[in-house]
Amino acid sequence: MKRNVFGVAAAIVLAASAVTMAIQNPPPAQSPQAPQMKEQRDSTITGCLTQGSSPTSFILNNARLATDDKTQPGKTYQVVLDTSAKGVDLTKHVGHEISLVGAAEMKAPPVPAAGQKIDDKDWPKLTAKTLSMISDRCTSAN
């Protein structure tokens, strides 16, 4: 009988120790944004560069990856230059068809209210590192 009581008491002490350890050392909490953030890989995206609503805002219209279906409408991105994009002058390429290498946001494009224009900052961003001119004019409209 004493063995049973001693065994039960030992089991209770071990269980209490395990619970205390778990409370004192909880597993690291994951950030609520961690699952939503995807690593953005650099891609080459081709489209027509247009002037945005301000002198420092640029929009890439009819933008496509090389593998995209040409019969489908292209996407629209707000172009932001990466800090590594030294010497890239977007103003010289407004109205040109260009290819940009950079990371593009994978968010859905905004839907404007009836009769409203989409603000430049609301488009998905394309953070460009390099620019190559394809043509001195846009060959396809968006």
Image (cartoon, grey):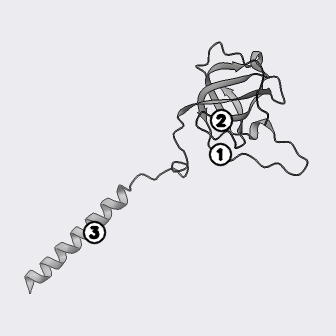
What is the quadrant of the C terminus in the image?
top right
Neighbour tally class for label 2: few under 14, some 14-19, many 20 plus, Cα within 10 Å:
many
Query: Does dot 1 land on a helix, a strand or a loop?
Result: loop
Residue appearing at x 62%, y 43% in the figure: 106
Q: Looking at the image, which residue sits at the far top?
A: 87
As drawn, the label of residue 107 is 1
In front of the other: 14 or 126: 126
Q: Earlier in the sequence, mark 1 or mark 2?
A: 2
Looking at the picture, how far across and down is residue 107, in whole percent? Answer: 65, 45
Q: Earlier in the sequence, mark 2 or mark 3?
A: 3
Query: Does dot 2 land on a helix, a strand or a loop?
Result: strand
Q: Amino acid at mark 3?
A: Ala
As drawn, the label of residue 64 is 2
Q: Amino acid at mark 2?
A: Arg
Q: Looking at the image, which residue sits at the far right?
A: 115
Residue identifier under label 3: 16
Query: Does dot 3 land on a helix, a strand or a loop?
Result: helix
Q: Is residue 74 above or below residue 129?
A: below
C-beta proximity under 8 Å, tags 1 and 3: no
Q: Looking at the image, which residue sits at the far front?
A: 71
Q: Amino acid at mark 1?
A: Lys
Residue appearing at x 81%, y 29% in the figure: 52
Q: Is residue 111 above or below residue 22?
A: above
What is the quadrant of the N terminus in the image?
bottom left
Looking at the picture, how far across and down is residue 112, in whole percent? Answer: 82, 48
